[in-house]
Image (tube, rainbow, N blue to C red):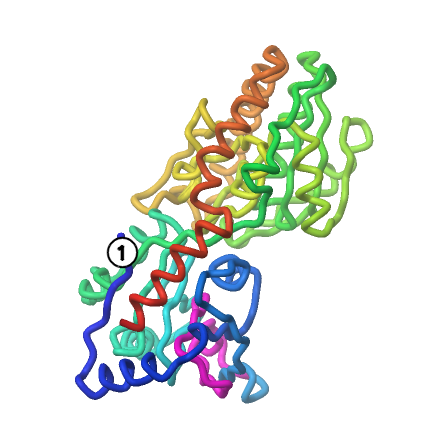
């Protein structure tokens, strides 16, 4: 899908033409509030003819102590400077500059307590001439936002949507070599600070099932033992027993590691475990694929776009709603079905890892296929060329 070209008033169009005619250098793209998400959709790339500039922004959250609850107040900033041709934001809707906005799920991203007028105000910003494109990180995100635009009586906003997945650093085709098969235990990797939501209990249980079955395996765990998650509101899962079982299992545990160390770990494993309960995208699946590491993931939201079951990785079945999310997400009684789902995830992981153990080349083959599928979409050079075209169209 190509980027939407906005209809503008004659005076705005004339000003845009004059600005481009007088510009002697690259397009100046402002990046407010730099963060992990914005990095992956803008300045991690080097789009031809584009220069990124960090701009200053002010939100109600920063203006006053005790700002009202809800994310609305953080996502409608006033941009102070410096001057740029266009802004590229991640979930933010600027009050006073032309912009394109990337989003991972909700758009507008008004989470938590809010009043109806806040949603109306955000929609007014999206409908304004200043909004030049709404860029979705996945097809799932596009469907999610489009359904909600229809529900609030703003179907015309779907014409402003485009698919731009962003970029992830990784080795070039010339630098890449598949992860070599080996004769030792199956090496599994789990990464996630939010261990409960990411599926750590299922991962540990799968390890126990494999050990009981005599399958040689080792898990590297990077992350924490969180006990609560929005997926199961009101529930607290005691992680102490899970943590206490680690010394008896083939596990190496790191509370946290820098990104470059995590990418190096990916090159020394056979499969990434990602049995997550809810996910807006799942950058870790992409990062693993670019390193040649296949993923065993739950079939949640955008994961089926990233993984072809049995060819570039494996998908664990899960009951989902029309948006591709687990049907019990956010329900007060979610703990009971979560326990059953966690057991199914554990059994599914154990079955797949048993197959990997029986076929020494399987993980390497699927990892190379995962790389072949996602590298053309996510490596920064190709993504940067697509992004430059989006900016030009937004200013056209």
Q: Residue at x 54, y 88 (%)?
A: 63
Q: Quadrant of the C terminus?
A: bottom left
Q: Residue placed farthest to the front in the image?
A: 24
- Image spot of residue 284 (x, y percent): 56, 44
Q: Is residue 142 left or right of residue 47?
A: left
Relative height, residue 395 to residue 80 (above, below): above
- Image spot of residue 197 (x, y percent): 56, 46
Q: Is residue 345 left or right of residue 85?
A: right
- Image spot of residue 126 (x, y percent): 30, 72
Q: Quadrant of residue 115?
A: bottom left
Task: Looking at the picture, tell me which residue is in the foreground, 378 or 63.
Answer: 378
Is residue 86 covered in magenta?
yes
Relative height, residue 134 to residue 382 (above, below): below
Task: Looking at the picture, tell me which residue is in the foreground, 57 or 7.
Answer: 7
Task: Looking at the picture, tell me which residue is in the foreground, 202 or 78.
Answer: 78
Residue beneath disc 1: 2
Q: Is residue 300 left or right of residue 61?
A: left
- Residue range of the region highlighted in magenta in the rendering: 67-91
Relative height, residue 104 to residue 111 (above, below): above
Q: Residue at x 17, y 85 (%)?
A: 10
């Amino acid at each position: 899908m190509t980027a939407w070209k906005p209809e503008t008033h004659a005076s705005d169009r004339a000003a845009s033409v004059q600005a481009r005619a007088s510009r002697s250098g690259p397009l100046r793209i402002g990046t407010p509030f730099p963060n992990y998400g914005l990095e992956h959709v803008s300045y991690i790339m080097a789009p031809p003819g584009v220069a990124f500039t960090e701009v200053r922004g002010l939100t109600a959250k920063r203006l006053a102590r005790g700002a009202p609850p809800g994310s609305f107040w953080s996502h409608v900033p006033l941009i102070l400077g410096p001057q740029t041709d266009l802004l590229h934001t991640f979930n933010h809707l600027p009050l006073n500059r032309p912009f394109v906005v990337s989003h991972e799920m909700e758009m507008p991203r008004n989470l938590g307590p809010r009043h109806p007028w806040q949603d109306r105000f955000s929609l007014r910003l999206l409908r304004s001439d200043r909004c030049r494109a709404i860029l979705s990180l996945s097809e799932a995100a596009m469907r999610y936002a489009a359904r909600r635009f229809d529900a609030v009586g703003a179907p015309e906003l779907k014409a402003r949507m485009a698919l731009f997945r962003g970029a992830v650093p990784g080795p070039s085709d010339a630098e890449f070599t598949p992860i070599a098969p080996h004769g030792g235990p199956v090496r599994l990797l789990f990464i996630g600070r939010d261990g409960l939501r990411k599926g750590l209990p299922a991962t540990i249980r799968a390890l126990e099932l494999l050990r009981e079955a005599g399958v040689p395996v080792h898990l590297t765990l990077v992350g924490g033992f969180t006990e609560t998650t929005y997926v199961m509101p009101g529930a607290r899962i005691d992680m102490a027993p899970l943590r206490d079982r680690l010394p008896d299992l083939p596990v190496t545990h790191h509370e946290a590691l820098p990104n470059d160390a995590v990418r190096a770990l990916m090159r020394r494993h056979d499969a990434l475990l990602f049995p997550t309960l809810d996910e807006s995208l799942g950058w870790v699946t992409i990062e693993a694929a670019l390193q040649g590491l296949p993923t065993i993931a739950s079939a949640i939201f955008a994961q089926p776009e990233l993984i072809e079951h049995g060819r570039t990785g494996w998908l664990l079945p899960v009951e989902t709603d029309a948006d591709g999310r687990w049907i019990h997400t956010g329900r007060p009684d979610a703990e009971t079905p979560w326990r059953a789902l966690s057991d199914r995830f554990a059994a599914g992981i154990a079955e797949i890892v048993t197959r990997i153990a029986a076929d020494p080349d399987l993980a390497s083959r699927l990892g190379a296929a995962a790389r072949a599928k996602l590298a053309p979409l996510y490596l920064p050079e190709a993504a940067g060329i697509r992004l430059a075209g989006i900016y030009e169209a937004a200013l056209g």
